[in-house]
Amino acid sequence: MSKSLFGKFLFVLMLAFMLLIAACNDEGSEEEPSDNEGDSSEQSSEEGSEDEESSEEEPESEADGDQIYSIDDFSEGVSNDGEPIDGGEITYGLVTDTAFEGTLNWAFYSGTHDAEILEWFDESLLTYDENFNATQEGAATFEVDQENSSITFTINENVNWHDGEPVTAEDWAYAYEVISHPEYDGPRGASAGFNLLEGIDAYRNGEADSIAGIEVVDEKTITFHYERLTPSLLTGGIWGYPLAKHIFEGIPIADMAASDAVRQNPIGFGPFKVESIVPGESVTMVANEDYWRGAPNLDGVTIRVINPNVVVNELETGGVDLVSTFPVDQYPANADMPNVEFVGGVDQAYTYIGFKLGHWDEEAGEVVYDPENMKMGDVNLRRAMWHAVDNSAVGERFYNGLRWNATTLIPPSHPDWHDDSIEAPTYDQEEAKRILDEAGYEDVNGDGMRETPEGEELVINFASMSGGDTAEPLARYYIQKWGEVGLNVQLVDGRLIEFNSFYERVENDDQAIDIYQGAWGVGYDVDPSGLYGRTAPYNYPRYASEENDRLLQEGISEEAFDVETRQQIYSEWQQLMVEEIPVFPTLYRSLLLPANNRVVNYDMHSDSKSHGVYLHELGVTQEEPAVAE
């Protein structure tokens, strides 16, 4: 490639921004996870719901006082600039009201809590900058051959697994082979980094024993050959997590996720290594002295589950130094906690209401969009439900402005791609009633609730998960607002659903669920195919259309290397989603993370992104945590 072409290629990549899955730097996943493979979109929702009476027109505030905050007022890193002591240990609180699943491998995990554990002991071979572009500072460097549509990666000679075995090109290729194998039943593999590989379909269909587009050059060098290059590949589209072949090759692929190598003795090449696990409760790690970037400052890290209801107490007493998340609704009452400092930024996430519009065809590996036979198939009903709720009030009253009204499915964490000019439905109950009237949803029997256009009873079953203090009142508020326009919305099973059960039921298209409340953590790349594409398992509403297919394909086309062209494509896609409404976004989110005052070298990007500090640099300035007096 000529210098001019290479420069243009990298320039475009540096401007292009996709989980997801959870929760990590290479996959879209859990609603956390991810909408692309390079960074997880993980399934992580803090909201839940409870079917109880509510009393106010406006949502009742669960926050402290009426002060409104702005995420712009927070720094992304701690101000402590002291020298870390030699050694020391910290405790990291995994904030959840349920046990973590314990699927501790990037290829198989599906929940954000597992991803939050994984980040401490395993990492992507690729590192990303502040604009989510792959850099040359990771465990693997790369060269792009635009003429031949290939990218060659070289793994650093010092990158070894925790058992001392080298991380090899074979391990990287093996990860692709496992994820793309017909017996693999996990959520990875839907990104362009997989789909555009030469020979991928033949391998997936069992017609080939290897993926033709993956060339292992030598022990540390691998070349990926693509049908074409796209702007998504180096902004999260490439799966950067190798799989230790010397450990997994003797395990049947269908059994890998449940194996001891994943559940009891997980391995990585990150700054810490797993020493012991109490299933669902805690993980103890020790420093990886042979970490390729250098030995960690800390001697070890303990990760343990803490309930959202006791986060503040754990922080005040020094029970934890850091936490995975802090309920922003609890910030106003604890903003002056003397022994911690809050860092913050715009979260790569949004909460949403999803509508079940079809089902997943496991054999075909794609969604079956079937609005004619689904209760929520009428877009007028979906639009009315969007108009019926006041998300601006929710953001202010529940979260003191630290969450705010969402408009499109590309959040402002990706400012070059989020189109704030799009006019999405806003709170207008009279408009909601008008839409329902015109669509034939009328109260036929005089009970105050609307029937279907065919005159049949309409009960909308709403799934929402348990979580922090806002879970119950927030779900209660949405149910109330929908009731005010004559829609009978009831909680599935009459209660909130715990995290793991919630996503299992949503993913399996439980027929008891008509609508659900979730949250997506989006990935580095803007490409939303991993969440809303026809072949994406995380397409939970099961929506598909030819126009959606077209726009998603154009977004990763050769023409999309032109930034303005790609911006226009994703603007059109955001508009399409506002019109079709397979889901509607409710709130954009800030991310607030408290750190004990003894913690040094910590910021919002203390993972594998080069614009923050790396986890091996994390340290403490004193042996014991600071406590609130």
Image: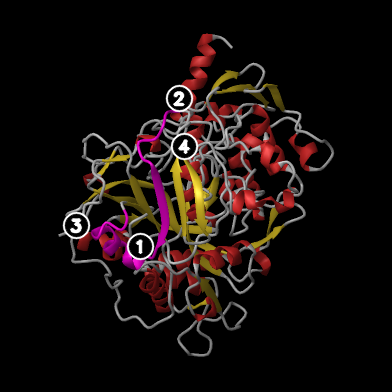
Q: Which mark is residue 288?
A: 4
Between 369 and 292, the one lying in front of the other is 292
170 vs 454: above or below: above
> Was residue 311 drawn as part of the magenta stretch in this picture?
yes
CB atoms at circles 2 and 3 under 8 Å apart?
no
Report the mark closest to the observer, 3 or 4.
4
- Label 4 secondary element: loop
Which stretch appears magenta?
Answer: 293-320
Residue type for callout 1: Asn
The CA span between labels 4 and 2 is 19 Å
* Residue at the image point whose x is 60% and y is 64% from the top: 504
**Which badge, 1 or 3, comes first in the chain's sequence?**
3
> Outermost residue toward the right?
207
| Residue 17 located left or right of residue 247 | left
Q: Tell me residue 252's x, y (percent).
A: 75, 49
286 vs 511: above or below: above
The CA span between labels 4 and 1 is 46 Å
Q: Tell me residue 440's x, y (percent).
A: 55, 75
Q: Which mark is residue 137?
A: 2
Q: Which residue is mark 3?
A: 337
Is disc 3 surrounded by few (<14), some (14 to 19) or many (20+) residues within 10 Å? some
Residue 509 shows in the view: yes
